[in-house]
Structures are given as structure tokens and as C-alpha cells.
Image (cartoon, rainbow, N blue to C red):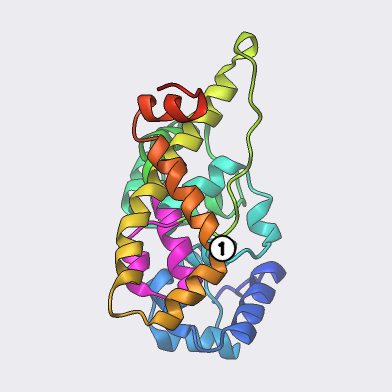
Amino acid sequence: MQAIVKDPGTEEGLKDFFDRHPQEVQLLAFFTRVSEATVRRWKSGENYPIGFSLLAVRNFLSLKGYKIPAHDKLDQEIRDFGALLAHRIITMDEAIAGLGYTNTKGVFRVVFGRTKPMEESLGKLREYLATHRDTLIKKRLEAEVGIKHGRDQVIDGATHAPEKPLPVLPQPSPSHSTSSSQDEHALVLQSLAHLMRAVKPLATMVNSQAFTDKEREEFRRLVGSAKEMFDTANLMNWLCSDDARKRHFLGLK
């Protein structure tokens, strides 16, 4: 039997995760789609994730904010393709057929960075990414809020903003508009749209009787102040129409 090769980043990340969150066995099991007993064996050091489980664990730890050198050094396209698999956006059978391999070994060699994809395989990989880019953004947001809040139903359902703020992108002058800036703007628009779709179900949940007044007070504390909430609500109101935005920002009547 082939020896299991552990990478220090994943092993240390798992150990730190279990040290900090000893009760979140169920959450990791849910994300990686393995049994809780399997996760407990990872926790005790009796076993170690391999194959698809390792791919899912790396994506889980990355969403938790861990730096996994073996994962982070991969080209962005390869990381994103691995995320398509980890989030079940495409199946392993689709990956095998699309990339022209005969079994999972070839796919795993690519997503773990052990080999470069063949040129024709790279073309198909990019097709998958182009087709599923919006879904991947949504799934990452869904998973991030579920992981941070430990709620399985949130991972499966609503989308939500990551805790880290979105980057402030440069504002190019009209004379220097490029395809790069257009791509950045498209990403901002897509991200904001996903966050907006997240607000209603999550706000409904927090406003329900399932949450206590004390928990809602904690929410306001986490936001920072009631003013932050009002300011955000106003910004979204001004985006409801160009007329509303112009009336505010341009002082039009």
C-alpha cells in the first residue's frame, strides 16, 4: 500500500482548527461529505484525508483563513478548478471526461499541482471556469458564512458576505478604461449582487423568534453601530434606481 504523503500546511491547519474548534467535527464532516467518525480519526491523528477529502479539507481551511502553502502556490486557475470539485459544482466524472483522463488519478495530479494539465485539458478546464464562475463565487460565499457561523443549513442555502471587506478597487479615468478594469467592475457587481441576495434570508432569520434580543444586540455590536446599518441601507436605497442615486449624489430634485 502506497504511503500517505502529508503536507505540513494542511496537517498543521487541521490541528490548529481542531484545537480552536474541538466541537466542530460535524461542520467539517458536512463540508467534506464524510462521516463524523472519519473526521474524528483525522482529529486524533489516526488517519489523514486523501484524494477528494484532502481537496475539500484544503478548501475548507482556506475559507477559514488558513495559509496552506501547497494549495496557495498553485495557479489561480488550478485552485479554482479544484474549488469547482470541492463545492460539487462539477462532478469527478465530468472532470475526468472533460480533461481527457481515464481515472481520478490524473485529475488529482492536476488539482494538487503534481503535474501540469495537457494543453487541450487546460482549454477544457478554462471552459469549465468560464461556465461556472458565477456559481463558484456564490458557493464560496455560501460556504464561508456557513463555516464562520457553524450552521449547516446556511452552507446549503443562503449566501452571505465574507467577514473580510471587499477590496477597494482603483477608479480608472475614462481615457484609461481597460478590459482589466471592466473585469474588476464585473466582479464587484457580481459580488454585490450575491451579497444582496444573501441579506434578505439572513435578516429574516435574525429577525425571527429563533434568535433572542440578546443575539440581535450582539449582531448590532458586530456591525459596529446602528449608524453603520442605516448608512448601508441608504446606499442600497440609492442603488434602487439611477434617479434615486442622482438625486442624492448630484443634488437633483
Using a 10 Å C-alpha cutoff, classify the residue at mark 1 as few (fewer than 14 neighbours), some (14 to 19) or many (20 or more): few
On screen, residue 111 versus residue 172, left or right, reads: left
Q: Which residue is mark 1?
A: 225
Would you say the magenta stretch is mainly helix, strand or loop?
helix
| Residue stretch in magenta | 137-160
Q: Residue at x 44, y 44 (%)?
A: 234
Residue 184 lies, with reference to residue 165, above or below; the image says: above
Q: Amino acid at mark 1?
A: Ser
- Whether residue 162 is visible here, answered yes or no, is no
Q: Residue at x 63, y 8 (%)?
A: 175
Tally of numbered discs = 1
Q: In this rendering, is residue 244 above or below 65?
A: above
Q: Quadrant of the N terminus?
A: bottom right
| Front residue of 252 and 27 | 252
Give the percent coordinates (x, y) of residue 158. Answer: 33, 60
Residue at point 48% right, 62% down?
Answer: 144
Which of the two residues, 227 or 45, is positioned nearer the viewer here? 227
Residue drawn 54% across the image and 56% down it: 227
Q: Position of residue 185 (x, y in %)?
A: 52, 29
On whether residue 197 falls in the magenta region, the answer is no
Q: Quadrant of residue 26?
A: bottom left
Going by the image, does 236 lie left or right of 114?
left
Mark 1 element type:
loop
Seen in the picture, residue 242 relative to 34 is either above or below; the reply is above
Q: Position of residue 138 (x, y in %)?
A: 39, 50
* One can see residue 222 in this view: yes
Give the x, y percent position of residue 207: 32, 70
Q: Within the image, what quadrant is residue 140 found in? A: bottom left
Q: Is 40 situated above or below 152?
A: below
